[in-house]
Amino acid sequence: MTETTGPPSRPPADVAVADHVLPGDVLPGDVLPGDVLPSWAVVDLDAVAANTGVLRERAGGAAVMAVVKADGYGHGMVPAALAALAGGATWLGVAHLAEALELRAAGVRAPVLAWLVVPGQDLAPAVAAGVDVSASAVWALEALARAARRTGRTARVHLKVDTGLSRGGATARDWPDLVRAAAAAQAEGAVEVVAVWSHLASADDEGSDALTLRQVQRLAEAVEVAGRLGVRPPLRHLAASSGVLAHPSAHLDLVRPGVAVYGISPAPERFSAAEAGLVPAMSLRARLALVKEVAAGAGVSYGHSHVTSARTRLALVPLGYGDGLPRHASGCGPVALAGRRYPVAGRVCMDQVVLDLGDDEAARAARAGDEVEVFGAGADGGPTAQDWADAAGTIAYEVVTRIGARVPRVHVGAVAERLGPASPGGAR
Ligand SMILES: Cc1ncc(COP(=O)(O)O)c(C=O)c1O
């Protein structure tokens, strides 16, 4: 692996992919040329870069931290991170230290924030790699200071305050103690407080705009308290995707969009991805494993919740809940074949679903090996991750993030080509 250097104290104004990858570090595709795959996910890195550019514009003067946790919401963490940096992000955000260290191991030198640590975790590797770490409690601050003393390197910390989500962050009552501990560790040179930050509870919900404004106000109050106690970090950050797109007052110095980077609306009841100028980056595809004719009255898939109403053709799609398709979308998740949408017939199984094609000309033309799109950019009425979320009663975040490791990611686009060998044609 590569030698890594810590982040610059200020994000670079102009970021190019070449600034973040060392030769040979990252291959954009993990599929061998010529492979024929049962299923795969095409990830358009140009869409990731373009979406990041849209968010950067919408964020006004705020810098953009692209959130790439959970394997880049299922899109492949390192390629997604590089595409977001190419699109104008200057920071990256993850939940776990291991994710941050994976970015560093891939040669990424941009500032990276990791926000989820537990007592007893070894923070020294993160401090040594120049990873910014969040602290919501005094024990985390002290652990960071100890890691700094051990590594001989100042730990960069973002102090998190709970402004109303009641998840991470210090309560208003605990906040002064956390700030005092940070001030002491900063005076000693063990830590550098980089930011005061928080997370919005309901920025996707029009009915909760008053709560969002209260959270903006509470963050301002926490910054004021910190200042009075001698801690005046250069950055404040609060907004994730819906904050970027719907709440300019929450933009502050830095925004942390995740799902919108991947082209998905964070607030589908407020605006669609297209209305926000976003393009879904992931297209989940498969080849039909079997097409066969059955008579009327055939029970389809486990439990026979679908029964054919007439002679028909059934098509077998090699994707199931073992690949992340929600089982709750049984009987309704949409799949496109040759420009037409068919709902999944019967239950979603672990490895496969069945389509009931009917008995028309299109059905008779279907062959094993034909390509289907389970979801994608939604062009020409094709199904989207949002359609699957609606079918399953969940959110599109969950749909893309759950696509499993068994589904190879094929990264495409000019950004992918700049990163290394092009992804294989066999999978497309
Ligand atoms: C602390 C934090 N910031 C930012 C994000 C990105 O959120 P979104 O995907 O809604 O933009 C998340 C994701 O859950 C998060 O936990």
Image (tube, grey):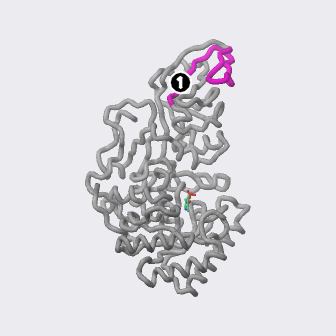
Q: Which residues are magenta?
A: 297-318
The correct choice, above or below, for 31 with respect to 13 in the image is above
Instruction: Tell me which amino acid carries mark 1.
Output: Leu
Q: How many marks?
A: 1
The image quadrant of residue 390 is: top right
Identify the residue position indicated by label 1 in the image.
Answer: 316
Residue 114: percent from the left, percent from the top?
A: 47, 63
Element type where label 1 sits in the image:
strand
Q: Is residue 124 left or right of residue 58?
A: left
In the rendered image, the residue lying farthest to the top is: 295
Q: Nearer the viewer, residue 277 or 372?
A: 372
Residue 146: percent from the left, percent from the top?
A: 43, 72
Please rate how many residues cluster around mark 1, counting C-alpha atoms within 10 Å: few if below 14, some from 14 to 19, many from 20: many
Residue 222: percent from the left, percent from the top?
A: 61, 78
Residue 299 visible to the viewer: yes
What residue is at 47 percent from the left and 72 percent from the top? 157
Residue 142: percent from the left, percent from the top?
A: 49, 73
